Each structure stands twice: as structure tokens, then as C-alpha cells.
Amino acid sequence: MSPRLFWSLLLGVLVLLGIPLTILYLRTHERVTETITLPAQGEAAYNPLYVLGQALRADGIEVHARPRLELQQMALGRHDTVVLLQDSSELPAPVARALLDWAGRGGHLLVRTPPPAEDDAGSTQGPLLDQLGVDSLFQRSECQPFHVQDDPGHVEFCTGRRFTLGFAASAQAERRWGSDHDLVFARLRHGQGRVSVLADMAFMRGEVDSPAARLAAAAGNASDGLHDRAHRDLTRYLLDPNYGKGSVWLVYASRPPSLWARVFYQGWPLWVPLLLAILGWLWGRSQRFGSLLPSPVLERRSLLEHVRASGELLLRFGQGARLYDAVHALFLHRLRLRAPVAAALEGAPREQAIAELLAWPRSRVASALTPPPPHDSSALRERIRLLLQMRSLL
């Protein structure tokens, strides 16, 4: 078969099989578009005001985001705006006074009341709200209707603590919003600047899954932070006094996740196997309860019994002279320590010196220092007894 014919047949087979399969695929499959919301990454994961900052930057406004309020490191301008998402009750009195002094020089401060607690008996609202004349203690949390043209059932401030104004604060109020008994928003004149007090700032947040969003969804009102058009309009209204005149400082009251938190939540595929390996190694090296091997047999003889058995063995094999020599050497060692002059003598003079030293007859000392006959066990015992007695008397 020629190469041209081979490739022609192969192309024809591919066409005959490819066209039916393509028609079958197009008839049995349908293109579907699915939108998947991925978890936030980077700064958006820990800064709830990240979306607000990006929107303000897109509008040409300089934005500074900080995790906590630190006036020494914040160069606040005369017409700047500070959005204080941080709990105002945490601010000490000097910081609150300095912040209000800055607002009195022309700044605009947005502050929220402390979040509601389970037990309000020991709760405080902090010196900042006290100096403004705002009272949020023992106040209720209730949704406030927000009339939107295309969403008649819209509500806001569902998770915040409402507040009331004192006499002096009420006289400085430019705007107020709420019911006849309490408020969810009030804009107060403070020197040359403004202070806006809010019951909650959940609508400014960028995360979709927030307590306010879940509560509003349960009430039949879809809420997703600044992604909602009504929330963008409300935020723009609240930022109005100094909007476009200076910088906006977003104090989002959060911290990036620590290294240990990242290791725990994101590094578990590495540390879990290592932890199991270490636990297994410790289990293998730890002391067991009980023993897998039988206990060793305790020795049934004392040292004296071993010595006696060794002596009897030597006597049985005719090695009594070795026993005598050992006791004789032991006696001579004691004699050198106690009577070195007598130990230096030899033969009869040594026997006479030892007899005078021990007050014994010379014949008895001579008998003890003379080796016994090879196979006379009684003479061996007698001479060993005399040597030990002489040693003890030295």
C-alpha cells in the first residue's frame, strides 16, 4: 500500500468517526456558567474595610488603613476623616480627648457604639462616648427600616446597640436617625468638625458572611456589605462632610493572623504526620506497665555460701595447700602493718618475735606457720584456724 493511500484511508476513518461523536457531544452536553466565591486572600482576609478602601482609592481619595488607633503614628490632617471600626470603649481617656481635639479642628470622626454584650451589668461605653454626651448603656438592638426604592423591606443596624443623646449633645446634633426613644445615627457638631455616631458599621464591611448579613438574610433582606447598592449610598452619605477634602483613615480593629495561627490552620498537612510520628516514637520508647520478659531468677546463695563452696571444691580436688597459702599471706600482710620488725625476720627469730607479741607459746606459733601435710584435712583446718586467730590478735 502506497503512503498516499494509507493517509487517505486514515483521514477518511477519522472523519467518519469524528463527525458523529461531535454531534453526539453537542446534543448531550450543555454549557453552564457557575460563579464560585473564593475565600479572601491577603489584606482582604483580615481587613473588613478593605473593599471600602479600594472604592475610595478608585474615586481618587487617599486612604490609610491601620489595625489600631495610634495617634502618634497617624499624621491626621485638618480635613481628614477617621472611620473608627475599633471598639470605642477600648480607648483610654487621653487618647479619646486627643481624638476629639483633632475633630474639633475640622476633622470628621465616625465612631460606633460598643457591640451589645450578653450581660450589660458590668459593661461600659468608654470615655469617648461619655465626652460626647452619648449614652448607649442598657439600650436595645433592633433593626431600623431603610427605605430603598427597589427594596421596600430593607433594614439596617440589626446587630448594633442604639443610643440616646444628652441635652448638650442633642443641641449639637445636625442629623439624627432612629425612633422616638433611641437613635441609630447622629451627626454632632464638635468645634469646627463633625462626629458621626452609629449603632453599627456592618454595612461598611467588605465580607459577605458577617453577623449583620446573616441576620438581615433571616429577616428576608439580602445583605452583602458594600456589594449592596443601598449600602454604598449610605456609606457615601455618612462620609459626606469632608469627602474629597482630605485623607480617609480606616481603623479596622483587626490584626493579621499570627504565624502560629497560619501554621495551625494552613500547615496541618505537615505537622499532623510529624505529630503522629513523634507520638508513635514516644509510645515505643515509653516505659510499659508490666513486662514482656519473665523476671530474672534471684540468686539463692549468699557470698559466704559461695566462699564455702569454693573451699570445699578445692579440698575435694586436693588443693588444700592453696587455701593455706591464701590465709598465710593474709596473716603476713597484717603482720607487716602492725609489727614490721617481726615481719622482716625469717625462720625461728620470726616465730619467737610473734610468740612474744601474742604472748603465745613458741611451739604453737611454729605449728601455725608450718604448712600441713598434703592430704591431712584436719591439720589444714587447725592451722587455718590458728592463723585467723593470730591475725585477729594483732
Image (tube, helix red, strand yellow):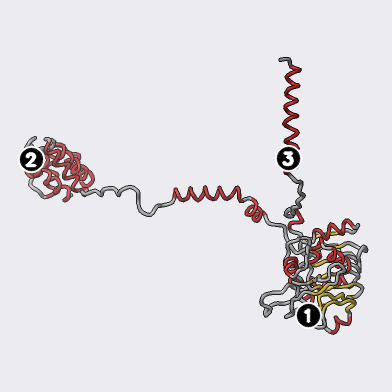
Q: Residue at x 82, y 83 (%)?
A: 180
Residue 186 rendering spot, x and y as whole percentages:
85, 76
338, 21: nearer the viewer:
21
The image position of residue 3, as x and y in percent, is 74, 16
Residue 152 appears in view = yes
**Quadrant where the N terminus is found in the figure:** top right
Task: Say what secondary structure mark 3 lies in.
Answer: helix
Identify the element where label 1 is drawn. strand
> Which amino acid type is marked by label 2?
Ser
Q: CA distance from mark 3 to mark 2?
A: 116 Å
Viewer-closest of 148 and 212: 148
The answer to whether the residues at label 3 and label 2 have Cβ atoms under 8 Å apart is no
Q: Quadrant of residue 72?
A: bottom right
Residue corresponding to mark 3? 25
Q: Residues within 10 Å of mark 1 (few under 14, many from 20)?
A: some
Amino acid at pointer 3: Tyr
Task: Identify the residue under disc 2.
Answer: 377
Q: Which amino acid is tagged 1? A: Asp
Q: Nearer the viewer, mark 2 or mark 1?
A: 1
* Earlier residue among tags 1 and 3: 3
1 or 3: mark nearer the eye: 3
Q: Earlier in the sequence, mark 3 or mark 2?
A: 3
| Nearer the observer, 249 or 224 | 224
Q: Which mark is residue 135?
A: 1
Q: Position of residue 27 (x, y in %)?
A: 75, 42
